[in-house]
Amino acid sequence: MAGRHGNKGVVSRVLPREECHILKMELLLI
């Protein structure tokens, strides 16, 4: 969980919230 939250923080800085959620969904599907 800690790793995911850390990655999410980095992604959220680069991408908007909407894209971050989409990317999160894709990671969960993999």
Image: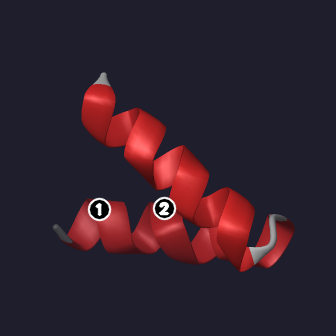
Q: Name the disc covering residue 25, or none.
A: none
Position in image of residue 9 (x %, y %): 56, 77
Left or right: 29, with 12 as reference point:
left
Q: In which quarter of the image is residue 17?
A: bottom right
Position in image of residue 23 (x %, y %): 56, 47
Whole-angstrom CA distance, mark 1 to mark 2, is 6 Å
Query: Label 2 amino acid?
Result: Asn
List the residue tagged with mark 2. 7
Q: Which quadrant is the N terminus positioned in? A: bottom left
Q: Residue at (71%, 58%) from the top-left corner?
A: 19
3 to 25, vertically: above or below: below
Farthest top residue?
30
Q: Residue at (30%, 22%) from the top-left corner?
A: 30
Q: Name the disc covering residue 3, or none.
A: 1
9 to 10, vertically: above or below: below
Find out whether the residues at labels 1 and 2 contact each other: C-beta distance under 8 Å: yes
Secondary structure of the residue carrying tag 2 is helix
Secondary structure of the residue carrying tag 1 is helix
Foreground residue among 13 and 27: 27
Q: How crowded is mark 2: few (under 14 residues within 10 Å), some or many (20 or more)?
A: few
Foreground residue among 19 and 9: 19
Query: Label 1 amino acid?
Result: Gly
5 to 29, vertically: above or below: below
Left or right: 26, with 2 as reference point:
right
Foreground residue among 18 and 8: 18
